[in-house]
Image (cartoon, grey):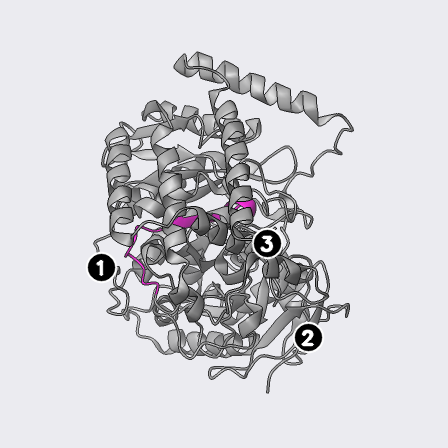
Amino acid sequence: MAEAKPAASAQASATTTSAASAQASTTTTSAGSTSAPTEPPAPEVDVDRALADLASPVADRTLTERSAVELAGMIRRGEVTSRQVVEAHIARLRLSEPKVHGIVAYRYQAAREAADAADARIAAADADEELPPLLGVPCTVKESIGVKGMPNTAGFKPIAGRTAERDAPAVARLIDAGAIPLGVTNTSELCLWIESRNKVYGDSNNPYDVTRTVGGSSGGEGAVIGSGGTPFGIGSDLAGSIRVPAFCCGVFGHKPSVGVVPTSGHFPIGVGPSRRMMVIGPIARRAEDLMPLMEVLNWDDPDDPYDRVIPLGDPAAVSMKGLRVVVPHGFGVTSYVSLELLDARERVVRHLEEQGADIVRVNAKGLIRAEIVFIDSLRAAWNDEFEASVGWESQKVRELYRGLRGQDPDHTAAFVNLASLVKLAGAVRRAGAPGPLEAAAKRLADKVEQQMGKDGVMLLPPLPRVAPRHGWTTLRPWAMQSMVPANLFGWPCTQVPLGIGSEGLPLGVQVMGTMDQDHRTIAVALELERAFGGWVPPEHAPSAPAPAVRSRRPQVRSAVARRREVAVARHGGTPGLGEKTLRLGVRAARGTMGLALKARGQR
């Protein structure tokens, strides 16, 4: 029998019940009603005790602030039980979920049973018995990654009610390692945008400010982990879908090198070039969990054409002294990035330089071409095979936009804009073939690697601004410009939180490495956590000051003037060239789209 839990979306939600899990009963939330959220019935839970565990520090930090590695060690040593840890996190979720709505289907009862089984196994174990590394530690999983019996729709309304028939290999590896899933989390529609909004579950909200996005497409993971609801989880990343939520919600996210973690069991699964660009990886509140999780997830899956087992390096063996740190500037990377985020990156540069790193500033020209090839690769992947695999009947552009005007639309505006853009671009120019596209990506990766060196890292801004308000990204696909090179190249990239900014929202930076250098980017993340503090629980974050009422134009001029000063001081280049180029590009794109619409008779 399924438990019942209405959604806690900011827009309100209604209760639906998912198919019963083969492992345990589950609860699904959906959008579309004005009913008030209520807590699920749980008569066997000692809520007062769970809240006491949450509020009372064990040594120096509460259970819901510790890393998975710490919690696993405490459970093995008998300092705390798995049941206590699970109940503390469930209590935390009961406090945060009505606000953030990160979990869309939970499995609390199954988690309690698994926690009791873990405690019994530890009690019966011999003193020298080797136990699974994550035994008894709770986690969450992105809804698009299969958890047997749980919803597996990627927020795509035409297939609402679909459940996973088996655990995805990545999930199976976590469960074998002793992890206990508490539920599955929200995503953007078909995992194809950088905000977590869909017509099945509604919006997820930022734990630091509910008027702001959690990012996407693994935004439910970012919301739950950023609010303290679980120590870690797994998401997927095609164009920053792990790193954007990690940035917006102030936690750590790691996009692995291609092939290290199997992607089979993910819905939707990429076709053509996109299969190589998408990865599954960890999101965690503490950096020390990233490499242990990578070691668990690193497995050879015969069903994944790109999967391989590689020996993962040791972050402890990486020294900051002599590390080559590349800092790109210019159009395509720093254009229109807020001064606060650029200044945060400069603080990182200064710290690493103090540790003996070799700082190299370069022009970002090579990365601009990477963004173009990435977009062409996505166009090549959006074909009849992809549409058939997700159970979607393709529509004309005019019909897609008409559908948005209905009382109960099937799709979000972001999905419709993206689908329309792909169709219109196809009317103007045919997408490249997969072979030449992969070859072009390889040539670009080789050029960027010449700048970085095999053992270097590159520091990239995550988004143009801190977590934006809901809907801000819908007409701004360029917002993910600094995210896509890592996906196109197949390289590892770690998103690192850098404290709280002036708006009361997390700051951050991306650390990208070359192929199979996951341990190197994670080593930098560990160093930056030590220097800047890492994740800040929302209740400890300083509040943003009241916004001043003033014209935006002087602010924009000030930002442009500052960028010009930086360009002249650092590169001696032509200031403002990136801004002029972007304006010309936007005008050209609008003209091309207008011609395409006219040619297709869609006007």
Q: Residue at x 62, y 42 (%)?
A: 468
For the residues bearing labels 1 and 3, Cβ distance under 8 angstroms: no
- The residue beneath circle 3 is 227
Give the SS element for disc 3.
Answer: loop
Give the camera-side residue of 373 and 452: 373
Q: Is residue 262 magenta?
A: yes
Residue 53 in view of the camera: no
Amino acid under disc 3 = Ser
- The residue beneath circle 1 is 309
N-term mark: 1 or 3: 3
Q: Residue at x 24, y 39 (%)?
A: 443
Q: Residue at x 33, y 32 (%)?
A: 366
Q: Is residue 531 magenta?
A: no
Amino acid under disc 2 = Thr
- The range drawn in magenta is 247-263
Q: CA distance from mark 2 to mark 3?
A: 23 Å
Q: For residue 496, what is the image quadrant? A: top left
Q: CA distance from mark 2 to mark 1?
A: 42 Å
Q: For residue 25, what is the image quadrant? A: bottom right
Is the residue 145 above or below the residue 65 in the image?
below
